[in-house]
Image: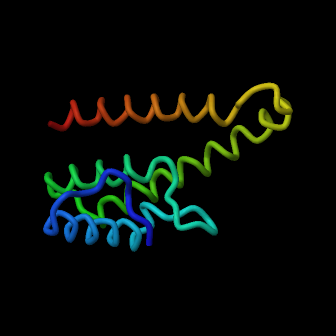
Amino acid sequence: MGRFRGQNENAGADDRADAQQSELERTQIVATRRGTPHYGRDALTLAIAARRLAEYGIDGRHLRAFKLSAEREVGLVEQAIAPYVRRAAGNRDVPGDVTQLVISFHAALVRTAMERTI
């Protein structure tokens, strides 16, 4: 198992970081890149966000639900953009463009819902 870059100074913090990393791997929030001991570019961002969310009682089971929701969104987007990806034929980064739009859209939906409920 690799270590997230930027992790910790003392033994207690290392133990907590190891436990958190194990939980994130167990719930498949983070995983090493296929065939390597290295994590993808967003693993550290996910780990930091998970640690901070835990301070508010949002734990592994909640994070897993977020992950499943994101995977469903990706499935919908992949189906919708498939014809555009084929037509672009390398001339445009359709997945990258759409990813940024989906992230903005999703963030606005979450903010709007949180404003209504809190």
**Position of residue 79 measured from the top left corner of the image (x, y, whole percent):** 70, 46
Q: Measured along the vertical axis of the image, is residue 19 above or below residue 82?
A: below
In the rendered image, the quadrant that contains the C terminus is: top left
Horizontal side of 67 relative to 52 (left or right) equals right
- Colouring mode (rainbow / by chain / secondary structure / one colour): rainbow
Where on the picture, by quarter, is residue 110?
top left
Q: Measured along the vertical axis of the image, is residue 63 above or below residue 26?
A: above
Question: Which of the pair 76/53 is nearer the observer?
Answer: 53
Identify the residue at horizontal 43%, vertical 57% (top origin). Answer: 67
Identify the residue at horizontal 16%, vertical 68% (top origin). Answer: 11
Question: Which of the pair 8/62 is nearer the observer?
Answer: 8
How many numbered dots are placed on residues in this image?
Answer: 0
**Position of residue 99 measured from the top left corner of the image (x, y, whole percent):** 57, 35
**Position of residue 25 measured from the top left corner of the image (x, y, whole percent):** 41, 69
Identify the residue at horizontal 30%, vertical 66% (top origin). Answer: 61
**Position of residue 90 measured from the top left corner of the image (x, y, whole percent):** 82, 32
Identify the residue at horizontal 44%, vertical 72% (top origin). Answer: 1
